[in-house]
Image (spheres, grey):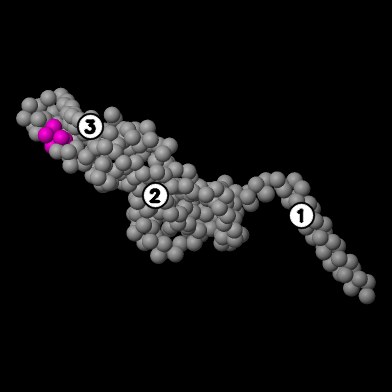
Amino acid sequence: MRLIQRRIGFLFAVFLSLLLLGGAKAAWLGVVKAGSLKRAAATQQKADITVPARRGAIMDRDGIELAVSQPAVTIAATPYLVKDPAGVSSRLAPLLDRREEDLIKQLTRRDTGFVYLARRIPPRRARRVQRMKIEGLEFIPEFKRMYPRDWMASQLIGVTGADNQGLAGLEFSLDKELHGQDGERKLTKDALGDTIDLRETKRTVPGSDVRLTVDAAIQDRAEEVLAQVGEEYKPKGATAIVMHPRAGELATGRRQQSRRGAGLRAPGPRDRRHL
């Protein structure tokens, strides 16, 4: 009988010790670590997403588009939901045109619940990634700046940066009119990464289109003449200005000598920022 009582007492002491240990652990997490755990939950389950506005188009006098924004997709991820970062990185790297090492660094982060994997890729490539059904990925619709006439009037039109802001030319000087107003959304996820709340906190306002007095056909012809002058006379540089004598409307062109000294070349997309 005494043996049974001792065993019961021992079990009671064990259960009491475990209860006290659990209570102490709960108190430590609830009081000492409450702040850090709350911040970690906020970074993992909440995110502020910027919704870019569609940038206005730049057109010539007849409405031919010289700069236009086309739909694109940005791929983001919730790192702690990606179960196999190395395997996912090897599968995504060829499609996203990124190094596996860079993707692994992003997918193994634990200080945030939202990271970008690729910005503004074509929708067709994004659909190929989406068909993989990789847990933890998000697909955000955005816009990518395109120049349908390639280098034509590039020194006038300019170029935009990665964040859709004008860096040179008319893209820079008319950035306020072209850019519009970006919107904002607040995203809240549950512990499994599923969206439980998505609220629009700021409405997106598209940018305004801009129509120039430049005539695309005349501009193109002026640059062709400059190219011919470069091939024939091999100057260091040449500039042409075509003006309507009554209206004063201008079409400008500029050519510069190539690095190899083989004549003049038209400014390409990489030259847009060098006016």
Precedes in sequence: disc 2 or disc 1:
1
In the picture as drawn, the residue positioned furthest to the top comes out as 236
In the displayed structure, 110 sits above or below 227; it is below
CA gap, disc 1 and disc 3: 81 Å
Asked whether 76 or 120 is in front, the reply is 120
Circle number at residue 26: 1
- The amino acid pointed to by label 1 is Ala
Mark 1 and mark 3 residues within 8 Å of each other at the beta carbon: no
- The residue wearing badge 2 is 143
Q: Type of residue at label 2?
A: Phe
Q: Position of residue 32 (x, y in %)?
A: 75, 46
Q: Is residue 222 visible?
A: yes
Q: Earlier in the sequence, mark 1 or mark 3?
A: 1
The label nearer to you, 2 versus 1, is: 2
The amino acid type of the residue labelled 3 equals Ala
* Dot label at residue 247: 3
Image point (43%, 37%), residue name: 176
**Among all residues in the image, which is located at the extreme right?**
2
Query: Which element type, helix, strand or loop, lies under badge 3?
Result: loop
**As drawn, which residue projects farthest toward the front?**
246
